[in-house]
Amino acid sequence: MIFKRPDWYEIIELSYLEDLKMLFEETQRMWRNSLDDIGEEIDQLDDEEDKDKYVDHYYDNIVQLRDDLPRITNNSILVNIYSFFEVQLVDFYSNVKSKTDNDVNAKHLTDKLNFMNERFGREVVTIDEIVHLDFVRELRNRIMHSNGKIKVNDFPELVIKIEEDPLTNISDRNELILDHNFIYNTFDIVESVLRNLNRNVSQL
């Protein structure tokens, strides 16, 4: 019987992503349940005028549960995902660089990922993954540095990218809106990329 050594990176490091995903799903479920409770209370009212008064009275709560809290949560989760990925990528990059005579000093995210592909002689990280991760980096910067506010005059190229992606949007108040599926996609891509990098780096 061949004993397979456990991959501690996947067991320990990548477990953080699973914990973060569970937190994300729980908060999403909490907002939805709260909205469903309000909807049920409205449905129990027979008179349309009473329903309108109820909605008017709890309008701010409804908007908060439907729009504000999911937006804040999604932005926060995206920042956490990217920060985790960035730390892991720097570690992998430093590891690979220490094992080669290459004097490249890649500072940008895409440069580091392209360096890894060149070092391994194959597309360990796909072009689509690199594009998505760089997009996430730009969104993360706007969340961190302008509280998720993105004005077309200040960031015209980023606004175009946001408008072209069906899972991202900008509100009429210039607020970044991330669909929950964009977060799920980012989870999947980050996990896949880190797993592939770990597998290849461990074989050096």
Image (cartoon, rainbow, N blue to C red):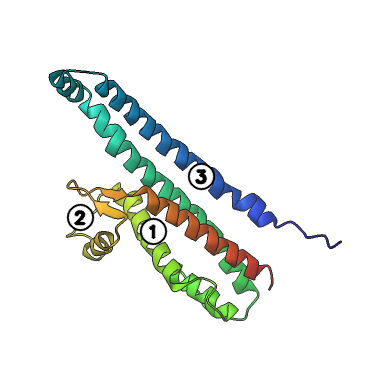
> Which residue is at the far front?
46
The residue that mark 2 highlights is 151
Return the x and y of residue 56 as percentages of the image width and height. 17, 24
Circle 3 sits in a helix, a strand or a loop, which is it? helix
Q: For the point 42% across and 63% down, which residue is it?
A: 133
- Checking the image for residue 20, the label placed there is 3
Q: CA distance from mark 1 to mark 3?
A: 17 Å
The residue that mark 1 highlights is 136
Q: For the point 59% across and 52% down, which residue is it?
A: 14
Q: CA distance from mark 3 to mark 2?
A: 29 Å
Circle 2 sits in a helix, a strand or a loop, which is it? loop
**Residue kind at label 1, given as amino acid type:** Val
Q: Quick one: label 1 or label 2, which is nearer the N terminus?
A: 1
Q: Quick one: label 1 or label 3, which is nearer the N terminus?
A: 3
Q: Is residue 58 above or below residue 131?
A: above
Q: Viewed as shown, does residue 5 lie left or right of 177?
A: right
